[in-house]
Amino acid sequence: MSEDIVICRCEEVTRAEILAAIEAGADTIAAIRRKTRAGMGLCQGRTCRRLIAQIISQTKCRKMEEILPATFRTPVRAVKLEAFCDTEGGTC
Amino acid sequence: MLETEVAVVGGGIIGTSIAYFLAKEGKKVVLLERDHLACEASGACDGLIMLQTKSPGVQLDLAIKSVKMFDELAGELDYPIEYQRRGGMIVVERDEELETMRRFVHSRRQAGLDVDILGNEEARRLEPALSSHIAGATYCSSEGQVNPIYMTFAFAMAAKKLGARICTGTEVLSIGMDDGRIRSVSTNLSDVKTDLVVNAAGAYAPLIGLMAGMTIPIEPRRGQLVVTERSPPLIGRGLLDARYILSKSSSDTPSAGADTIDRLSGGLALEQTATGNVIIGSTREFVGYNKETTPDGITAIVKHSTRIVPRLKTLCAIRAFAGLRPYTPDKLPIIDLLDRPEGFLIAAGHEGDGIALAPITGKIVAESILAGKVDASLQALRLHRFKEDDQ
């Protein structure tokens, strides 16, 4: 696979950058995110999360299920801030 | 078995800063981090470097020195830390709060800080996105922001270049002592032979303290934050609001219409990062070591911030997260080199000031270790200021 292929489209992070982060010791999805911003963009890793897990799995010889996170952060998808202002709790 | 002069426990911005300043002095350092670098509070906070919020006295003096160090560090550390000295403001929502804030500004000016109070028009000329209802804002041009994660990486990488050993995935399990002095640290990997342990474990510092037989009165305080999608420039400066400051002054009642954010003891903290994302905070809650975000907390933050900056409403929230700030009862960090056990140094408890105070903390700790004692001017930061019955 080409090393300059884009893995995280939102933050434009390439496979080479992910591999470099793993090489530098970032061997979890969260650590790679902090190092490269992969998964920090608009879709929050919905597309690249599995791809990054695969790269870790292949480089580190670890099972996919050990790498993928068990929980996802709120909000699961992008929500306009305006939408929170119409909900209960606190006053605008 | 590893052997070192100093073992630093904690790979957040404080621990890595200490490792850097020690390595710079030629000390042999091993940094022990349970997980990865910046994976607790230093990786789950805003990057604001504020001065006005510090109490006149030792806290403000240290902050002023620390902020001056950022310019130098930005050149010295070989990493893009996204440091920007863009100034900071504390937004005042109601006219009747202006008088308290005038006194607040006056006390900071007397301590040597370049801070002013602006009326509605002047404040909105600087920050046009502020709501038209605000009474005014304080303004300090020396304030700024940094990427706290990158700052942590920058310190760690620079320390490593100077010979420090950065061990991630290395959890401290116990501290070996002999005749009242530190001898070693046991971890899940190698044991480390050392005469000096630096406890820079933030909200987890009490757990490391217990291993050396002491009580450290730090409590985890949860701060929830929301991040928006990237946006064209919306906010130029770091923004706080006067709520937190006013809540400390008993004569002032909180503004009407923001009950949830008050109950969560929070206030506004807003910055637009180098990438264009807006970070919006924050709550300040005592919920033990719980790092979950809550619908109530996120809603309160969003409602409060969109009232002050209405244009935020058009942006999308892409992520919410929470970090545990290390709270101390008197709001000052603990920096102390103890006699008993000998060779145990505490540098923790910065609560929300950890990013701003990281450079000076690293420098002070390195100087204290070289001198064999903490400078007399820092008495107010020593552990024994807390009486036994407070602990």
Image: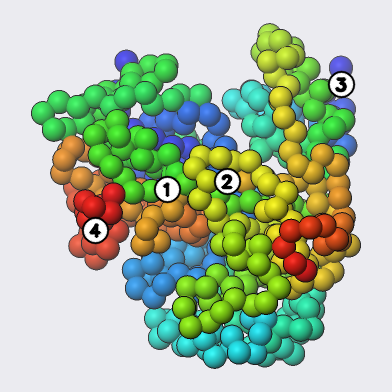
Q: Chain for mark 2?
A: B
Left or right of B341? Residue B322 is: right
Q: Residue at x 55, y 56 (%)?
A: B284
Q: Which residue is mark 4?
A: B385
Q: Is residue A47 visible?
A: yes
Tag 1 or tag 2, which sits nearer the N-term? 1
Do discs 2 and 3 belong to a common subunit? no
Amino acid marked by disc 4: Arg
Tag 2 or tag 4, which sits nearer the N-term? 2
User: In the picture shown, does residue A92 fall above or below B119?
Assistant: above
Residue B21 in the image: x percent, y percent? 39, 47
- Disc on res. B219: 1
Q: Chain for mark 1?
A: B
- Disc on res. B100: none
Amino acid marked by disc 1: Glu
Residue B187 in the image: x percent, y percent? 38, 21
- SS under mark 4: helix
Query: Marks 2 and 1, how far apart in space?
Result: 13 Å
Residue B14 in the image: x percent, y percent? 44, 47
Tag 1 or tag 4, which sits nearer the N-term? 1
